[in-house]
């Protein structure tokens, strides 16, 4: 059957039973803040044009999804958009003190817990094996949660499900950022400056989370950057110098590299996701399955970096590149980088064989 005929048939289904489907998409969209939800409504309106123009209608819907996800209005989907969108999902922000107290309650004395909250788990003397175990439990919990949501959002199928793509992406990266925050706190990082509503955040926080996403996807030098940041925190580098490094100094080119890579990746994935969700039931199974398969390897990459820094490993030994980056942070070095000078992602792929328990 030709693409045009498939789209027409899907449009017929949407017109006959679209109300129930639209309501499900709306429920997903309501979990995101008002600005993103309004953008999703525009996506649903674009979906209603399916059947009127075949290929052109697909393009219109694709453009509407891109617009819905472009949170900073620069015309592309990059890491900043994913973070801003994800932080609008309720429950993504993790409060460091309460989280650490809850996690260590079963394993540590009250005195040790207080010390871990006031300093770091390493300084408090929390056993490294306990921390690793808690991190593994965190990854498993967040992975199972996001996989179930991804499957639920994809299950109804039909072209109308293009409206759930922004919600699906927001949930996926929301849970990824939840896992990232938890791992960072367990391995000694201070609390990220994210507001209660998860919408307003400073550039330092945004760029710190961008570096974490870069590590999760194997972007070149992102791991080195986080290790240098960890040493800066461990040695008490002034907040002003940290901010400079993240927003216009030695860490900033890496942040831009991550954003550039995500811009390319997400534009392709959103379009692929559109057709994935056009398949009833199977779309949900595929979506949930791929989410489950990719989530753990991404988190494990970040775990491997976080567990071997100045904040988490008493025997940590820095590389020459990390030392240079740390010195540049301390010196307040400013770095101007042209777009064509940015490094690309390393040649690494996430496969289903990496997902075993």
Image (spheres, rainbow, N blue to C red):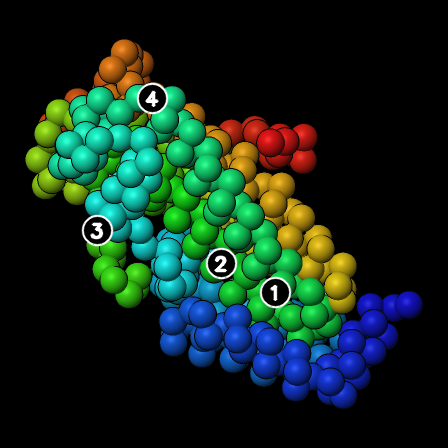
Residue contact at pointers 1 and 2, CB within 8 angstroms: yes
Q: Quadrant of residue 34?
A: bottom left
Which of disc 3 and disc 4 is earlier in sequence? 4
**Which residue occupies 30% across, 61% down?**
198
Q: Between marks 3 and 2, how big is the CA–CA gap?
A: 21 Å
Front disc: 2 or 4? 4
Q: Is residue 8 above or below residue 328?
A: below
Cα separation between marks 2 and 4:
30 Å
Query: Looking at the rendering, which quadrant does residue 19 occupy?
Result: bottom right
Q: In this image, 311 relative to 174: left or right?
A: left
Q: List the residue tagged with mark 3.
A: 193
Answer few, some or many: residues within 10 Å of disc 2's Cα (few below 14, many 20 plus, some between 14 and 19).
many
How many residues crowd around disc 3 within 10 Å: few (fewer than 14), some, or many (20 or more)? some
Q: Which residue is mark 2?
A: 171
> What residue does disc 4 label?
128
Taking depth in this image into account, of 352 and 124 the one nearest to the observer is 124
Query: Which mark's residue is nearer the viewer, 4 or 1?
Result: 4
Q: Name the residue that disc number 1 marks.
A: 153
Tell me what residue is drawn at x 58 percent, y 68 percent: 164
Report how far apart the C-alphas of labels 1 and 3 lie in the structure: 30 Å
Q: Which mark is residue 335?
A: none
Split into 4 quadrants, where in the image is the C terminus?
A: top right
Q: Earlier in the sequence, mark 3 or mark 2?
A: 2
User: Which residue sits at x=41%, y=58%?
Assistant: 86
**Rendering coords of residue 108 (x, y %):** 26, 30
Q: Residues within 10 Å of mark 1 (few under 14, many from 20)?
A: many
Q: Residues within 10 Å of mark 4 (few under 14, many from 20)?
A: some
Going from N to C along the chain, the mark reached first, 1 or 2, is 1
In x, y percent, where is residue 248? 21, 42
Q: Is residue 39 visible?
A: yes
Q: Which quarter of the rendered picture does the N terminus lie within?
A: bottom right
Where residue 354 appears, x then y in whole percent?
62, 30
């Amino acid at each position: 059957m030709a693409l045009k005929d498939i789209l027409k048939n899907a449009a017929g289904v949407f017109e006959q039973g679209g109300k129930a489907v639209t309501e499900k998409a709306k429920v997903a969209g309501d979990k995101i803040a008002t600005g993103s939800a309004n953008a999703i409504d525009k996506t649903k309106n674009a979906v209603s044009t399916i059947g009127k123009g075949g290929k052109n209608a697909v393009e219109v819907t694709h453009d509407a999804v891109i617009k819905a996800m472009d949170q900073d209005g620069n015309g592309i989907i990059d890491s900043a958009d994913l973070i801003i969108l994800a932080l609008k999902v309720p429950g993504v922000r993790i409060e460091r003190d309460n989280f650490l107290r809850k996690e260590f309650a079963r394993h540590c004395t009250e005195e040790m817990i207080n010390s871990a909250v006031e300093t770091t788990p390493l300084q408090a003397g929390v056993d490294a094996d306990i921390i690793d175990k808690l991190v593994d439990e965190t990854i498993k919990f967040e992975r199972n949660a996001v996989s179930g949501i991804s499957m639920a959002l994809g299950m109804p199928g039909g072209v109308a499900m293009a409206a759930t793509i922004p919600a699906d992406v927001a949930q996926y990266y929301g849970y990824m950022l939840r896992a990232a925050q938890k791992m960072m706190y367990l391995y000694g990082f201070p609390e990220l400056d994210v507001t209660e509503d998860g919408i307003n955040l400073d550039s330092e926080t945004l760029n710190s989370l961008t570096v974490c996403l870069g590590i999760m996807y194997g972007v070149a030098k992102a791991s080195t950057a986080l290790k240098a940041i960890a040493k800066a925190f461990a040695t008490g580098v002034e907040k002003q110098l940290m901010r400079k490094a993240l927003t216009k100094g030695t860490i900033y080119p890496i942040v831009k590299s991550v954003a550039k890579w995500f811009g390319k990746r997400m534009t392709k994935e959103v379009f692929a996701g559109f057709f994935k969700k056009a398949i009833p039931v199977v779309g949900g199974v595929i979506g949930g399955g791929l989410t489950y398969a990719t989530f753990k390897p991404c988190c494990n990459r970040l775990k491997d970096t976080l567990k071997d820094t100045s904040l988490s490993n008493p025997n940590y030994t820095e590389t020459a590149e990390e030392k240079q980056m740390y010195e540049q942070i301390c010196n307040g070095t400013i770095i101007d980088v042209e777009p064509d000078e940015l490094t690309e992602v390393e040649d690494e792929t996430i496969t289903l064989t990496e997902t075993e328990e």
